[in-house]
Image (cartoon, rainbow, N blue to C red):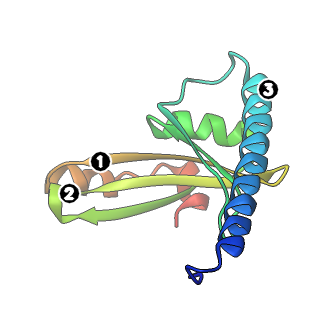
Amino acid sequence: MSTNPSDSGRTAALAIDALGRMHRDAAAISRVLTQLLADAGDDLPDLTRIQTQVGYSDYPPCIRLRAGDPDVARAWAAHLGVTLTRKDVPTAVIDGGSRHYAGSTERDGVQVEIGSCTNYYGPAEWSAALAETPADEAEVTA
């Protein structure tokens, strides 16, 4: 969106509105994340990263929980009540590929995502990864 440079009142109004949304989203993220961690207690394995993002356009504020491996992602997904989907992606840069697990839910207007990614280096490692599909993952393969 562009504004007329001489329309300083409109620009100020846009800035005030954006700051208000940012503060509301940050407060919502804080409430939801605090509750998620309190509910989890010490029963769930540690995550490797937590990212947050305020909302924009038609996208709600978001909390991204990143797990170090699929088992950690599965534990958090079960806690959140979400189904993980699996996606295998060939990657020329590493001459192999990556396996992504992801799932999401909404809590009090905040999108909560859980995911993990495992890289397989070289054709042999990638082929072996593609060949092994545990039976319990059949329903979540994307």
41 with respect to 2 (left or right): right
| Disc on the earlier residue, 1 or 2 | 2
Q: Which residue is mark 3?
A: 39
| Disc on the earlier residue, 3 or 1 | 3
**Mark 2: which amino acid?**
Gly
Query: Which mark, residue 119?
Result: 1
Provide the secondary structure element on which disc 2 rests.
Answer: strand
Q: Image quadrant of residue 87? A: bottom left
30 with respect to 133 (left or right): right
- At a point 15% along the width and 52% down the height, the residue shown is 124
Provide the secondary structure element on which disc 3 rests.
Answer: helix
Q: CA distance from mark 3 to mark 1?
A: 31 Å
- At a point 59% along the width and 40% down the height, the residue shown is 74
Nearer the camera: disc 3 or disc 1: 3
Q: Quadrant of the N terminus?
A: bottom right
Measuring from the top left, give residue 39's x and y in whole percent: 79, 26
Measuring from the top left, give residue 24's x and y in whole percent: 79, 49
Comparing 66 with 78, the one in front is 66
* In contact (CB < 8 Å): disc 1 and disc 2: yes
**Mark 1: which amino acid?**
Asn
Q: Which residue is mark 2?
A: 96
Comparing 116 with 14, the one in front is 14
| Disc on the earlier residue, 2 or 3 | 3
